[in-house]
Amino acid sequence: MDRQKETRLRKAGWKVGSAEEFLELSPDEVALVEVKLALSEKLREQRADQGLTQTELAKRLRSSQSRVAKMEASDPTASVDLLLRGLFAAGASRAEVAGVIGKKRRPASRNKARGNSAK
């Protein structure tokens, strides 16, 4: 967020901070969210690299296309276990999965506007 916008929001009574601050996440919770996001992104990439459709991957998982879509969209109902199963079903190696888990994500946008506390 640019400085002018941040200043304007603060003057209007908004608090500006990160999602972690807003949600009061512990470092462990932040790490879990980051891992789940990374696994979801890798699943989408792996499936596409293998030339699989969501439906084809769903058949390998004995699941549905909509479940695969949720997995790839980082839906909170998609467990880490299911994401891992999806990656392996899409042909990812354990080394590739380990690389995804070990890689630190860079934040998309560190500063987000928070609820208006002045009103």
Image (spheres, grey):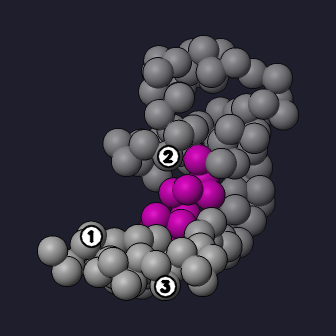
Q: Which mark is residue 7?
A: 3
Within 10 Å of disc 3 (Cα), the crowding (few <14, some 14-19, many 20+) is: few
Q: Nearer the viewer, residue 106 or 97?
A: 106
| Residue name at image x 42 percent, y 43 percent | 75
Residue 96 percent coordinates (x, y): 77, 56
- Under mark 2, the amino acid is Ser
Q: Please, which residue is most extreme toward the left here? A: 119
Q: Nearer the viewer, residue 110 or 7?
A: 7
Q: Is residue 36 magenta?
A: yes
* Res 25 visible: no
- Under mark 1, the amino acid is Gly
Measure the C-alpha gap from mark 1 to mark 3: 15 Å
Q: Which mark is residue 115?
A: 1
Residue 110 percent coordinates (x, y): 55, 76
Locate the N terminus by quadrant: bottom right
- Under mark 3, the amino acid is Thr
Within 10 Å of disc 2 (Cα), the crowding (few <14, some 14-19, many 20+) is: some
Location of mark 2 (residue):
74
The residue stretch that appears in magenta: 29-40
Within 10 Å of disc 1 (Cα), the crowding (few <14, some 14-19, many 20+) is: few
| Residue name at image x 52 percent, y 18 percent | 65
Residue 58 percent coordinates (x, y): 56, 21
Measure the C-alpha gap from mark 3 to mark 2: 32 Å
Res. 9 image quadrant: bottom left
